[in-house]
Image (tube, rainbow, N blue to C red):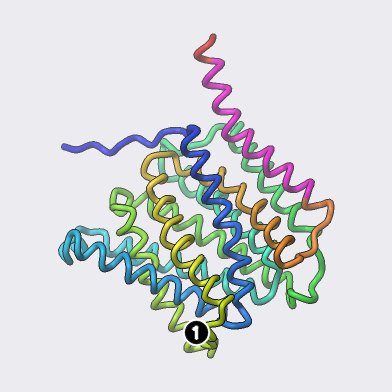
Amino acid sequence: METKAARRPLDATAFGIMLVLCICWGFQQVAIKLAAPDVTTVMQIAIRSGFTAVVLGVYLVWKNGLAQFRDGSLVPGIGIGILFAMEFLFIAWALNFTYASHVSVFVYTSPIWAALGLHLRLPDERMSRMQWLGVLVAFVGVGIAFAGNGAAGGAASNVLLGDFLALLGGASWGLTTVVIRTSSISEAPAAKTLFYQVAVAAILMLIVALVTGATHVEFTQTALLSLGFQSIVVTLATFLIWFWLLKRYLATRLGILSFMTPLFGVASAVIVLHDPVDASFAIGALLVLAGIVIVNGGEFFARKAVVEG
């Protein structure tokens, strides 16, 4: 009988890959906001998800045929697809009300939700007291980074509502990770896992767009560049890499490392969209980085001390 490969702690390779992923993920909120005047935020998610679903669907059928979808992964696949759609629906709505920098911060509370769920469900994902302290420090940092980013006005019409929607997006992402790691889809190929997510998301987001009347699409140069980045780089490439990492490394550690994303997200929003920022963001950013060091660096030095001792 084939045994499941054990997930391992983070190494230099995983850290380097996650750094690139976080830069791409951090910029995606800015890309969506830039194209919003030309393509509604909900339609952007529907288009990019639909593109990725077609590419992956053709690849999967060509490689393994339709029989692969009768292996018991369909039900959990639809489940993670619904959660994935909810995540990006909340993000799309949030960007209509608040700053892209705020969305970048609150969406990436996802590791907190994932850590809570995985800690309860999987023994090998249980975290030490020191690591939970790191989670707490990072979460406090995220809250402080958000707190002083400016009042509603200009690019934001209802900051509180938008921030709450972004937080729901983060919870949906975290729950998606829990379902992936605790169901039969855990061992499915990354392309297949992503296909379920984007296929369901494309259908649901298109329905939401039609029901709410948010169907405006004008393919300007800005819209095409934004949709190309979102579809090819973010939705297709980075998420395939993310699921590849999930099969090899501990999901909780990867999730905590993704706290770098809000830093890149806020920085790009400030530079490109001129989002307001103040000293509270700097303090929050330092706490986020401290949390990452506690969770990942603390574990490394603890293991090193045991070996040297």
Coordinates of residue 167 in the picture (x, y in percent): 62, 62
Where residue 30 sits, quadrant-wise, is bottom right
Residue 46 is left or right of residue 6, and the answer is right
State the count of labels. Answer: 1
Which residue is denoted by mark 1 in the rendering? 209
Is 187 drawn above or below residue 125 in the view shown? Answer: below
Q: Residue at x 52, y 36 (%)?
A: 127
Q: Main secondary structure of the magenta part?
A: helix
Coordinates of residue 303 in the picture (x, y in percent): 52, 21
Q: Residue at x 45, y 65 (%)?
A: 84
Q: Residue furthest top?
A: 309
Coordinates of residue 170 in the picture (x, y in percent): 56, 59
Quick check: is 203 in the magenta stretch?
no
Q: Residue at x 66, y 44 (%)?
A: 138
Q: Nearer the viewer, residue 36 or 309?
A: 36
Where residue 185 sits, quadrant-wise, is bottom left
Q: Nearer the viewer, residue 116 or 66?
A: 66
Badge 1 amino acid: Ala
- The magenta region covers 282-305
Residue 76 is left or right of residue 178, and the answer is left
Q: Residue furthest right?
A: 279
Residue 52 is left or right of residue 37, and the answer is left
Is 75 drawn above or below residue 145 in the view shown? Answer: below
Coordinates of residue 117 in the picture (x, y in percent): 48, 49
